[in-house]
Amino acid sequence: MEPTEENLRAWEQLHGRRADAATGVPWLPPPVRHALADLTGKRVLVPQCGTGESAAQLAELDATVTGVDSSAAALAVARERWPRILWIEGSPQTLPRELRRSRFDLVYTGWIMQWLDDLDGWATGVAAALREGGDLLLFDDHPAANAVDGLMHWREDYFREELQLRRWRLGQIVTSVAGAGLMVRALQEYPQQPGNPRHHDARIPGTFLLHAQRR
């Protein structure tokens, strides 16, 4: 399924804000950095890379990085800032054919779930991009955090599936990853961090990290 016009407009606005606030931002969260193996000489794919901050940090770890994004404006910013990285325009749900050839050692993606209309298409593309034994690292907001406000009130139904911005449940995400032929190696949940403008209670899971491997 192709991204809707509303989703594309939302991505343009998001990437514009990211470009303005990029300096000094830790785009690779500490749990991701802790989970990374030695990337020297490894081929890394970053679907929906935005303006390229996470991809650039992975390249600094001596990886050969390819960034993919559906926003031409975001990629223009990335190309200007990091011209030595390969940037490709494409949807994370239907990766370009040249990327689906089992060549990547790692696929890293962060904060992408609510923008996906086709969860199975995304997972299938990730599996097709990875070599045998290659890894997926997915870091994102915890679905429960998106349903609870800062006063510990449920602001929406956790099981509701919205038509535009999807609120994928954790079970749906894991099931799609497993259904694409990836073996789940670890699923870690982290408390909400102080300073988050939406949630202020550490008892609520704030983010999660999923590690899966192609068999």
Image (cartoon, rainbow, N blue to C red):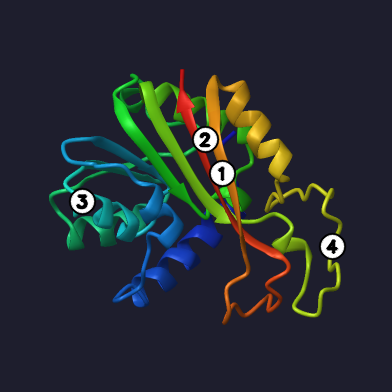
State the residue position of label 1.
3
Dot 2: within a 10 Å radius of its alpha carbon, few (fewer than 14), some, or many (20 or more) residues?
Answer: many
Asked if one can make out residue 29 in the rendered structure from this viewpoint, the answer is: no
In-image side of 31 versus 155 (left or right):
left
Indicate the position of residue 90 as horizontal and vertical percent values: 40, 39
Give yes or no for contact between labels 2 and 1 (Cβ–Cβ under 8 Å): yes
Name the residue tied to disc 3: 61
First reached walking from the N terminus: tag 2 or tag 4? 2
Dot 4: element: loop
Instruction: Return the disc, 4 or 1, that comes first in the chain's sequence.
Output: 1
Mark 3 or mark 2, earlier in chain: 3
Distance of label 4 from label 3 (alpha carbons): 40 Å
167 w.r.t. 88: above or below: below
- Secondary-structure class at tag 2: loop
When asked about the image quadrant of residue 106, the answer is top left
Instruction: Measure the C-alpha gap from mark 2 to mark 1.
Output: 9 Å
| Residue 36 percent across, percent down from the top left | 35, 46
- Secondary structure beneath disc 1? loop
Q: Amino acid at mark 2?
A: Gln
Residue underneath mark 2? 93
What amino acid does circle 3 point to? Leu
